[in-house]
Image: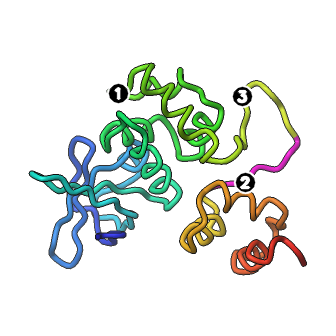
Amino acid sequence: MIAHVSGVVAEKFGQSIIVDVHGIGYEIQVAANDYDSSMLDEKVKFFTYHHIREQSQELFGFSSLTAKKLFEMLISVQGVGPKAALAILSLGDAETVRNAIALSDSVFIAKASGVGKKTADRVGVDLSDKVGLATRVPTVQSNEPTIDTKDEAVEALMALGYNLSDAMSALASVSAELPTAERVREALRGGRS
């Protein structure tokens, strides 16, 4: 299994990027925001999902571990394949998509290419309780602090086996002012100082 690819962007076409890793080019399909932010000859790192079928193998890449984990959740839903999951992740950053799923916002999810209303409803029903609470609720102003899922502490906890929801819950009572390593330690201890 290929867990991540680090190298230089050699080519871009369609929704794919070819990453040159010491002379070997890996074609990686990415979400729209990762495609747009990747520049030719720029060093990049993508967390990858290696999709193997009987007649083909494909790599799907994500600039954050959070997006990869969300992708893996999406493809677990009946009727959502890797291309549909990537289309859903192309609707916005991982946090925006996660919030839409947490709120079961099927209208937002159905905007993805190849995803109908029935599938969008199924995504909301199957995953809303698995992605954690919404950190941004539309049309409601809140003074509550939000947790940034691009946060290195969230990604570190996910690398240790936490799912997105549990990682965010564990960090909810830990000060965001602490260094990442200390935040992870506090989260592992249960937020006790």
Q: Position of residue 172 (x, y in %)?
A: 79, 59
Q: Residue at x 17, y 66 (%)?
A: 25
User: Measured along the vertical axis of the image, is residue 21 above or below residue 119?
Assistant: below
Type of secondary structure dominating the magenta stretch: loop
Give the quadrant of residue 176.
bottom right
Q: Please give the range of residues in magenta.
A: 143-149
Q: Position of residue 80 (x, y in %)?
A: 36, 37
Q: Is residue 157 magenta?
A: no
- State the SS at label 2: loop
The quadrant where residue 60 appears: bottom left
**Residue type (three-letter) at the residue carrying disc 1:** Ser
C-alpha span from label 1 to label 3: 23 Å
Residue with the mark numbered 2 = 147
Amino acid bearing label 2: Ile
Circle 3: residue type: Pro
Picture quarter containing residue 15? top left
How far apart marks 3 and 2 lie (CA) works out to: 16 Å
Q: Looking at this view, name the residue that lies furthest to the left.
A: 55
Indicate which disc, 1 or 3, sits on the residue closer to the N terminus: 1
Q: Mark 3 points at which residue?
A: 138
**Mark sitting on residue 113:** 1
186 with respect to 115 (left or right): right
